[in-house]
Image: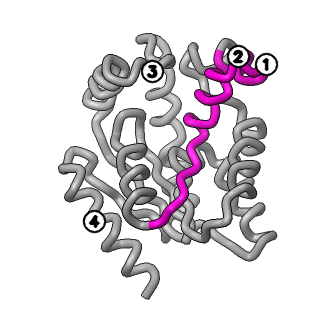
Amino acid sequence: MIISFIGPSGCGKGTQSKILVEKDNFVSISGGAILREEYRKNTDIGVELFNKYWKKGLWVPDDIIFKFIIKKFNDTESNNVILDAYPRTLLQASLMDDYLANIGKKVDLVFIFNLSLDISKTRIIDREKIEKRIDVQDSAIKNRLISYTENIGKIRKYYKNKIVDIDANSSIETIHNFIKKKINEDKE
């Protein structure tokens, strides 16, 4: 099963992804985690992408992030994959679907974590204090949330029959139970 978690920064996608990895034998593929790791390793591409895009709150171009996602996807042997915060744009969705169709797979469900942008911003700032994240300047947060808002409608329309809305204000346990229920229903 291939599922996607989409929502504004700080909505709980990563938390729910970690829970499914730990409890339910999923593998998580997160473009953000991949890019942060490249930056921490001080790779040329990691530093370049951080300085050119990420620290400004801009998304890495679709073709570049797609290559990172596909490499990670090809490295996994699991049939249960979470695309954490991917796809973010219509082009990313189309590229992913074309790739998956070529290998006889598809995105089964797209979970959209609904959260107000004000709460999202507060959570991002709080997360930075705990995790020492590298991508939380105020202008970067604003740009990231604007980009999300501009793209989510197109993603909804593209995946219309696969969308599962989540109230990201709910408790972690409530959200996890809801996700598990929807996954089990889809498997039936």
Comparing labels 2 and 4, the label whose residue is closer to the camera: 2
Q: Give the residue number, with chain letter if any, for mark 2.
A: 47
Q: Give the residue number, with chain letter if any, for mark 3.
A: 133
Q: Earlier in the sequence, mark 4 or mark 3?
A: 3
Instruction: Give the residue type at disc 4.
Output: Phe
Real-space Cα separation, disc 1 to disc 3, in angstroms: 20 Å
Q: Residue 170: give x, y in percent of width and height.
A: 19, 50
Is label 1 in contact with label 2 (beta carbons under 8 Å)?
yes
Q: Which mark is residue 44?
A: 1
Q: As rendered, which of 173 and 150 lies closer to the eye? A: 173
Point 44% across, 79% down: residue: 186
Q: Residue 188, relative to residue 140: is it above or below?
A: below
Real-space Cα separation, disc 2 to disc 4, in angstroms: 38 Å
Q: Secondary structure at mark 1?
A: helix
Q: Secondary structure at mark 2?
A: helix
Instruction: Give the residue type at disc 3.
Output: Arg
Q: Residues within 10 Å of mark 1 (few under 14, many from 20)?
A: few
Q: Give the residue number, with chain letter if any, for mark 4.
A: 178
Q: Secondary structure at mark 3?
A: loop
Q: Secondary structure at mark 4?
A: helix
Q: Which residues are magenta?
A: 25-50
* Drawn side of residue 146 relative to residue 173, left or right: right
Q: Residue 35: give x, y in percent of width and height.
A: 63, 30
Point 67% across, 23% down: residue: 41
* Drawn side of residue 58 relative to residue 178, left or right: right
